[in-house]
Amino acid sequence: MFPARSIRRKQALGPPLGPRLRLRVASSLPLPACLARALRLCVSTLLVASPRKPQEPGLRPAALPSTLELLKDVHLGLPGPCQDPARLALLSGHYLYYHYGCDGLDDRGWGCGYRTLQTLCSWPEGQSSGVPGLAALQGALEDMGDKPPGFRGSRNWIGCVEASLCLEHFGGPQGRLCHVPRGAGLRGEVERLYSHFTAGGGPVMVGGDADAQSKALLGICEGPGREVYVLVLDPHFWGTPKNRRELQAAGWVGWQKLNSVFDANSFYNLCLTRHT
């Protein structure tokens, strides 16, 4: 078990800022001094009264409200993946479901690692207090020297290695890293996951290279026929979820077969959260 080097990806630039406000008064005739002073005062008042806010990367003010009500423990009420399971283990404690756009920032296509990390940070109390925003996470990684100058405000992805660094930096739950070599899938990690959840562990962040979509694992189950299932929480939801049932019915949280949800051609890193 050792930290794997995180994969660096090309920086995707945010949408360009709009044109700057330029006011020009052109006249071929000289203005009286009193009129010139009045005109300068009007222009100065207009610029001060209507400042232009800098636009954050990916921010679309009309896309989603700036504050959404986060849902808690969205897996509750889900039926098991099979009848008479040989063994079943779920996470302890509580968490909040962070997903694309949940704070009004349009991070579709690049923010799944940050959202999964925020879910980890909300454990074990299931509260948003103390959960850092995306800008704070990027700033911390840059300040720690894990990312180069300019990472702050970018759309670069992060994975489990960065998640473990941020958990320690912000004083959240402890993040224990595990590396799974390419071609192994997670079949060899079944016992580790059972031990983690039965010992009171929290959500497990998972991400790889060929399978670069970050997700969280909330539990594991083994059926009577030795088929293994994992409870997957997917952060790629975009919108305003009304309740747990909506997310469950659409498959944003649910049981999936271990052999089908993970790519055998990808390596994986895991970040297992537990009490400090």
Image: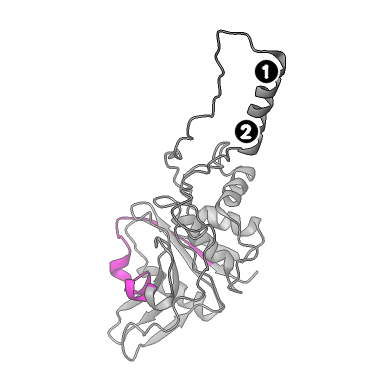
Q: Position of residue 27 (x, y in %)?
A: 55, 12
Looking at the image, is mark 2 or mark 1 earlier in the sequence?
1
Q: Which residue is mark 2?
A: 46
User: Of residues 86 and 136, which is closer to you in this image?
Assistant: 136
Side of 115 where 141 appears, left or right: right
Q: Position of residue 53 (x, y in %)?
A: 58, 40
Measured along the vertical axis of the image, is residue 57 above or below residue 185?
above
Residue at horizontal 46 percent and vertical 62 percent from the top: 99
SS under mark 1: helix
Q: Which residues are magenta?
A: 247-272
Q: Which residue is mark 1?
A: 36
SS under mark 2: helix
User: Of residues 46 and 141, which is closer to you in this image?
Assistant: 46
* Total residue callouts: 2
Measured along the vertical axis of the image, is residue 231 above or below residue 38?
below
Q: Name which residue type carries label 1.
A: Ala
Query: Is residue 254 magenta-colored?
Result: yes
User: Of residues 199 and 10, which is closer to you in this image?
Assistant: 10
Q: Quadrant of the C terminus?
A: bottom right
Q: Name which residue type carries label 2.
A: Leu
Q: Quadrant of residue 225?
A: bottom left
Which-is-in-front pick, marks 2 and 1? 1
Residue 234 in view, yes or no: yes
Q: Are marks 2 and 1 in contact (CB under 8 Å)?
A: no
Side of 80 where 23 appears, left or right: right
Residue 257 in view, yes or no: no
